[in-house]
Structure formats: structure tokens, C-alpha cells
Image: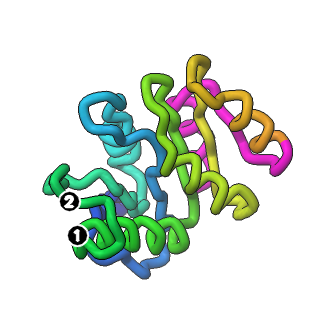
Amino acid sequence: MIQHAMIEIQSPKTIPTTAVPKIFLAGSIEMGIADEWQARVIVRLKNEEVAVLNPRRSDWNASWKQHKDDPMFRQQVEWELNALDASDYIILYLDPHTKSPVSLLEMGLHARSGKLFVVCPDGFWRKGNVDIVCEKYSIPQFASLDLLLDHLIGLF
């Protein structure tokens, strides 16, 4: 019997070029505010043969200047952009307790990609905008992260 094993790739580790599906975890990440939903996804996918590209890194340093000339900040942003492009699927979870402007930017960048799956609960400050974009570009939208993962696992 073949054992399936999910691998998690955190920024800034090298993005694999393997044939397994690559899933990018886009969405709310505000430290101390956003639900750590990425950990729930990792647990749920642990028995799947996938690579999870996780921008939430254990060595994040809030002192990094959010400026293009800060080498650590640049490394993070470029890793995320490359991981989004390299992914086969993008999970976008928008926590209603956050604003998540970068997540909304990522949604716009990949709205036409065909690889975006969205959870935007009631209470998210721009839920109406997200709903309309999902409708216009036929982006699958789910009522919960569990329902999204049920659907996604069915695609492997």
C-alpha cells in the first residue's frame, strides 16, 4: 500500500517542481487577529499527496519594513507571488475580523486563473465585492473552509 504524504513548504523555502498538486494558502494572516486557519488546512490535508505552499512563516519578524528595499520583506513578497503562480489551486480564506488588503490583491491577480477557491464569511468588510467578483468570474465560493476542502480533496 502506498502512503500518501502532504508536504508543507513555508516561505522562503524552495517551491517544488514535483508533479503533485500544489496548493497556495492565500488569505487572512494578520498576526494576533486572524484565525490560524492555515494550520487547520494542514491537518486536513495531511494524508493527501499534495504540496501546501504556506506564506505564514514561523520566523516572521514584524520589524521588517514593508518597503521594496528591505531584503527580507522583498523575499517574502516575491516568494508569495512565485508560489501563487506555481500553484495548481489557491485557497482564499477571508477572516471577518480582518481587512486582508494583500489577500484581496491576490484575489484580483488570480480571479481569471481558474485555480481560485474562496471562503468569505458574513461580516467580512468587503464581502459584497468578493461575492460579485466570484460570480462574474465563476470562482467557486464555499460557506466554510471544511466545505471548500471537501470539494478540493475530491479533485485529487
Judging from the image, what secondary structure is the residue with disc 2 in?
A: loop
Instruction: Locate residue 112: give its quadrant.
Output: bottom right
Residue at the location (51% across, 30% down)? 146
Q: Is residue 12 above or below residue 120?
A: below
Is 14 magenta? The answer is no
Q: Which mark is residue 64?
A: 2
Which mark sits nearer the N-terminus, 2 or 1? 2
Q: Is residue 1 visible?
A: no
- The quarter in which the N terminus is drawn is bottom left
Tell me if label 2 and label 1 are in contact, CB under 8 Å.
yes
Kind of residue at badge 1: Met
* Residue 54 relative to residue 153: left or right: left
Magenta-highlighted residues: 136-156
Residue at the location (36% across, 75% down)? 15
The answer to which of 70 and 2 lies nearer the viewer is 70
Q: How many marks?
A: 2
Q: Residue furthest bottom?
A: 17
Residue at the location (70% across, 64% down)? 113
Q: Residue furthest top?
A: 123
* Residue 130 relative to residue 25: left or right: right
Q: Which mark is residue 72?
A: 1
Judging from the image, what secondary structure is the residue with disc 1 in?
A: helix
The answer to which of 104 and 56 lies nearer the viewer is 104
* Residue 25 relative to residue 34: left or right: right
Q: Is residue 65 visible?
A: yes
* Residue 100 relative to residue 1: left or right: right
Decide: few, some or many residues near mark 2? Use Cα within 10 Å; few <14, some 14-19, many ≥20.
few
Instruction: Indicate the position of residue 75 as horizontal and vertical percent values.
Output: 30, 73
Kind of residue at badge 2: Trp
Instruction: Locate residue 147: give its quadrant.
Output: top right
Q: Which mark is residue 19?
A: none
